[in-house]
């Protein structure tokens, strides 16, 4: 199985790059990838110092970054920038801690020249931790 480096597809960079590897990619349609929750993540130092938990918003962002890779890998959207337009029906089912590896998936449910929607999931060892419906707009890069 070949994998993709997300830095080749999306503009995010550490410390805000929340996808380590993209394992499957169907441009404009779907993708899967992973993010290793490292103990040295700066956000974990304060959330919570004696009981570190990866915030749900970071899980949603990781799913969204994978979605951006799915969109930007489609030749129709090169030179564009997918931006959040809305987060719908986000649900968190399990605590995510340092040492966990998030298994990310997203499927585009609609995609046009100006906007799109996607349904994403994050799991740890196959157990669902987050699910979300995302709405995004597609802007010109640098806008």
Image (spheres, grey):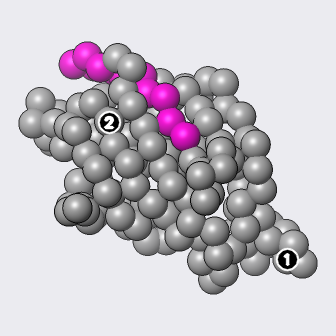
For marks 1 and 2, the one nearer the N-term is: 2
- Depth-wise, is mark 1 or mark 2 nearer the camera? 2
Residue 21, image quadrant: bottom left
Q: CA distance from mark 1 to mark 2?
A: 36 Å
Residue 120 on the magenta segment: yes
SS at mark 1 in the image: loop
Out of 70 and 49, give the one closest to the viewer. Answer: 70
Identity of the residue drawn at 29% across and 50% down? 24
Residue 42's place in the image compared with 25, above or below, is below
Residue 136, image quadrant: top left
**x and y, in percent, of residue 128 in the image:** 65, 45
**x and y, in percent, of residue 116 in the image:** 36, 22
Viewport quadrant of the C terminus? top left
SS at mark 2 in the image: strand
**x and y, in percent, of residue 96 in the image:** 71, 60
- Identify the residue under disc 2: 30
Task: Locate residue 114 relative to residue 42 in the image: left or right.
Answer: left
Residue 74 on the magenta segment: no
Magenta-drawn segment: 111-121
Badge number at residue 49: 1
Residue 65's place in the image compared with 38, above or below, is above
């Amino acid at each position: 199985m070949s994998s993709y480096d997300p830095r080749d597809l999306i503009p995010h960079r550490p410390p805000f790059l929340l996808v380590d590897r993209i394992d499957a990619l169907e441009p404009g349609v779907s993708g899967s990838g992973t993010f290793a929750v490292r103990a040295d993540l700066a956000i974990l130092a304060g959330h919570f110092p004696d009981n570190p938990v990866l915030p749900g918003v970071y899980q949603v962002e990781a799913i969204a970054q994978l979605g951006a890779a799915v969109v930007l890998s489609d030749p129709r959207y090169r030179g564009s920038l997918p931006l959040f337009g809305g987060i719908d029906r986000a649900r968190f089912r399990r605590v995510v801690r340092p040492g966990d590896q998030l298994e990310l998936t997203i499927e585009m449910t609609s995609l046009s020249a100006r906007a799109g929607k996607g349904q994403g999931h994050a799991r740890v060892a196959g157990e669902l931790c987050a699910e979300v419906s995302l709405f995004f707009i597609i802007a010109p890069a640098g806008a």
